[in-house]
Amino acid sequence: MANVIIYSKANCPYCDWAKHLLDNKKINYQEIRVDMHPEKLDEMISRSGGRRTFPQIVINDQSIGGFDDLSALDKAGKLDDLLK
C-alpha cells in the first residue's frame, strides 16, 4: 500500500475533494493540517517543490501536486498504479 500524505487546511474545498477521491478508492492517507500545525508549512513547501497552494499531495515521497493533478492522474488511469 502506498504512503499518502495530504497537506491541507480548513475551509478548503479542493482539500475536501482530494480526500473524498481517496476515500472513494479506500486509500488510507495521513492528513497534515497546516493551519493547525504551522511548523509543517516549510516541510510542505520543500516536499512540493516550492508550491504553496492547498492541498499538496505526496505519494511515496513523490509530490503529486494538488487536487487538479490528483484528479487528472485518476482520469488518465495512472493513479491506481501509484497507489499500489
Image (cartoon, rainbow, N blue to C red):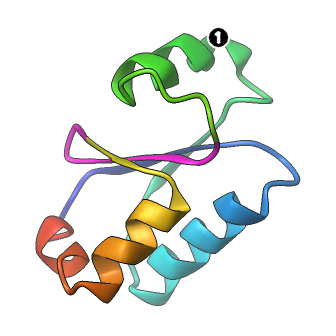
- Left or right: 5 in relation to 34: left
Kind of residue sitting beneath label 1: Glu
Q: In the image, is residue 8 above or below residue 42?
A: below
Work out whether residue 69 or residue 3 is closer to the camera in this orientation and state it: 69
Q: Is residue 16 left or right of residue 73?
A: right
Query: In the image, residue 47 lies at what x, y percent?
Result: 36, 25
- Identify which residue, 79 or 38, lies in the foreground: 79
Of 42 and 76, which appears nearest the observer? 76
- In this rendering, the answer to whether 66 lies above or below 25 is above
Task: Give the residues in magenta.
Answer: 54-62
Is 60 one of the magenta-colored residues?
A: yes
Secondary structure beneath dot 1 equals helix
Choose top left, top right, bottom left or bottom right for residue 40.
top right
Query: Residue 38: x percent and y percent?
Result: 72, 17
Residue located farthest toward the right when viewing the structure as drawn: 11
How far across and down, in percent of the image, does residue 15 sit?
A: 66, 58
* Count of numbered badges drawn on the protein: 1
Q: Quadrant of the N terminus?
A: bottom left
- Is residue 51 shown left or right of residue 76? right
Q: Residue at x 79, y 28 (%)?
A: 36
- List the residue tagged with mark 1: 39
Is-magenta flag for residue 84?
Answer: no
What residue is drawn where x is 24% and y is 74%? 79
Image quadrant in which the C terminus is located = bottom left
Rendering quarter of residue 34: top right
Residue shown at 39%/86% (left/top)? 25
Tell me which residue sits at (50%, 53%) in the image: 66
Image coordinates for residue 42, horizontal then vertical, percent: 53, 11
Label 1 Cα neighbours within 10 Å, binned few <14 / some 14-19 / many ≥20: few
Residue 55 in the figure: left or right of residue 16: left
Q: Nearer the viewer, residue 3 or 68?
A: 68
